[in-house]
Image (spheres, coloured by chain):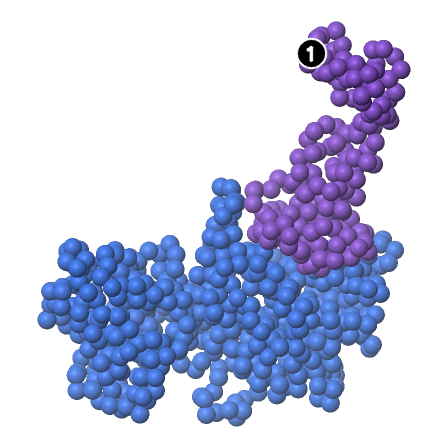
Amino acid sequence: MPSQSTSEHHVPSSIYAVVQPHQPTMAMDASLAYEQQQQEGRVAEVFAVINDNVDLLAEVLGRLDGRSLAAAGCVCRVWAAVSTRESVWEAVCGRHVEGGAAAGAGARPVVAALGGYRRLYRLCLGPAADRLGAAARLSLSLSLSLFSIDCYERRLGRERGHPRPASLLFLDHNNPVDVS
Amino acid sequence: MSRSDLGTDPYDSVEDDRWIASASASRGEIDSLLQGAGYRVCSTDLRHVAIGLEQLESAMVGDQCVASSAEAIHYNPSDLTAWVDSMLSELAPDPHLPRHPHITATANTWADPTQQRPSLHGLENHHQHRSVPAVSLQSMDEEEDAAIRLVHLLVSCADYVQRGDSEMAGSLLGQTRLALARVNTGFGIGKVAGYFVDALCRRLYPPPLSAAGGGGSAANPEILHHHFYEACPYVKFAHFTANQAILEAFQGHDRVHVVDFNLMHGLQWPALIQALALRPGGPPLLRLTGVGPPSPDGRDALREVGLRLAELARSVQVRFAFRGVAATRLEHVRPWMFQVAPGEAVAVNTVLQLHRLLGDRASPEGGDAAAAEPIDTVLAWIVGLKPKIVTVVEQEADHNKPSFLDRFTEALFYYSTMFDSLEGGRAGGSHRGGHHHHHHQQQQQTVAEAYLQREMCNIVCCEGAARVERHEPLARWRDRLGRAGLRAVHLGSNAFKQASMLLTLFSGEGYCVEEADGCLTLGWHGRPLISASAWRADDDAALPCDHQTLLVLQDHSSSVTSGSNNVVDGDDHHLRQHSVVRNNDTGSGSSCSRV
């Protein structure tokens, strides 16, 4: 929500909220400078704070590459919640698949049943992109086939106390932690 | 050119000349083979070369003098005679070396360069690089020469085994073990040779409690297979290619039935279930019949796999039904056990199974006069099922030759290529892995090697009904399947692209997918190791199901007991009904019913 600076000591929310008002800090100086500039009419009044508009945030984060998106989840609780949304990861996956997002639209229930887009990226599309280069595209059928095998092996492993399924380890670089 | 016919004494020079003389008809052939391999040497010179190499080896092993070879000019090693002479001339030769029996085996091995030998290929390449004055890599050459000597010893030992001379074979085996000690057994030819030495030993001196199908530990074959599945791409390639063919064949059909000749953990089927779930027009009703060996400890392994697959199918909303058929041997399976419903599209899937049905091959001139083998019966009823597609994946090697020595040599080179690929594939894949990842891969590779070792042992140690690893090359399978009334289906570019992509995702260097007449082969450095092909019944060649068998077996059936397997045993034809796992639309969970 853009905040109108009506009061004299109005501080724009969110970013500056953590700063204790009575402690003089650089941020405080900055906000005073901002106020000054606003009153001088040099700065636009609209100040959009991204955390107040999570759908917008989702749109933005959905355009990131996988690693950046995962890192973005570490910024704050709001970002963590948004960056684990399936729709966001669906957008990311769509960019790594032949035919783009349109081809994968019908696959949504299947992907959800097998473990979700975030997992699909983490286990399959991400490592494949690392291996093949960012520009390369995997076919949807191949990536989902590999994904289904992994899903199946996890169930097998849980049932019998097998060692962790490793079919997709050939794609993986670090020893993955099971976050299922 | 079988040496066992001649019965010559290898120490007798006159006999040796006679051997070479009697082979003069094929000398021209040998010469052209040698030239094809890049050697400019005549077959008559081979004995001289072999003796020279022996002298060279003993001289170099004993001789620590390195400096002199730095200035020497070596002839191009493709001109073997001159090369050997030039090497010997700078080192002091010992003129009194005794001639060893394996010299003639050397000639034998040199004369068969048509077989690709990648592990020795590297050795040959290294020799080529020394054609200019260069620093001598003494220890490396020692290693290579020791490896070559090891192979010669192995082959000649196998030769003696074939001739039945267990004394000579035993003593050669001792020499081989010594030679093994001089080679790095951690990788490459040394590792494979170690396994073959053990296998030969087991054949010569069978252990008292030898189990049928020998050479195996008590390890669960499914677990070994699972690790082999993960350590290298061969089985994945097989599964993906077969699934692609099955998918294409099932287009437009509402009810489909897949028969899997070796279910194991059912790793092939999640991908097919997923692909059917996503196919345009919606998924069909999928029935899967999995054949497998009966579980030893009373556990119903087949049913468990069926349950897991049913779970997966339910989660992606594919109507699914599973049936398991337990059989100790594939030839005991009968088509009525699959209960193919009319109007179903049937796919028969055999991955590395058909070769188990073969028998001893008659001599090359025998042709079709051989007695009916189990393979013919099975192929006949496969055709009788009128399948829309039959997917066949087999090892690309000839391990069913009548002569033991031929089998042994082929197996030596085939499995050394296999092991190379396990090694090479691993090294490439773990380039970014952490310590745990590396360790895990190492473990997997070891178990995968154990899986291969079982096959190797079966080829070397077993005969008759116990030898099940009777691999035959694709050309022979084409003939056989053609005679049974099956026509080849071209696998198509989708399968090829998928296979290539699959390999790129693995550490791609070294593996190669090739297309040959509509079939795909996967190999390592140009040597194809596994082939995948698809077939369908000729419309006029379909035979009716064998209903006679149905009646006969039913007469022997005992009373039905609850929840037990369809166990088909060659010895007693007891039949009990198998539990069927059915997955309903309502998703109410799988139920077991007796049919």
Residue B584: horizontal and vertical position, in percent?
84, 59
Q: In the picture shown, does residue A71 fall above or below B192?
A: above
Residue B305 in which image quadrant: bottom right
Type of residue at label 1?
Thr
Q: Which chain is blue?
A: B
**If the image is split into quadrants, where does the N terminus of chain B sit?**
bottom left
Disc 1 on helix, strand or loop? loop
In the image: residue B89, left or right of residue B560:
left
In the image: residue A86, left or right of residue B473:
right
Q: Does residue A50 appear in the picture of this structure? A: yes
Residue B158: horizontal and vertical position, in percent?
34, 73
The number of callouts visible is 1
Which residue is at 73% across, 89% downward? B540
Determine the residue located farthest toward the top in the rendered image.
A22
Q: Does residue B296 appear in the picture of this structure? A: no
In the image: residue B555, left or right of residue B525:
right
Q: Colour of chain A?
A: purple
Which residue is at 79% across, 40% downward? A59
Q: In the picture shown, does residue B472 fall above or below B494?
A: below
Residue B288: horizontal and vertical position, in percent?
73, 66
Which residue is at 51% across, 68% downward? B523
Q: Which residue is mark 1?
A: A25
User: Residue B311 or B432: which is nearer the viewer?
Assistant: B432
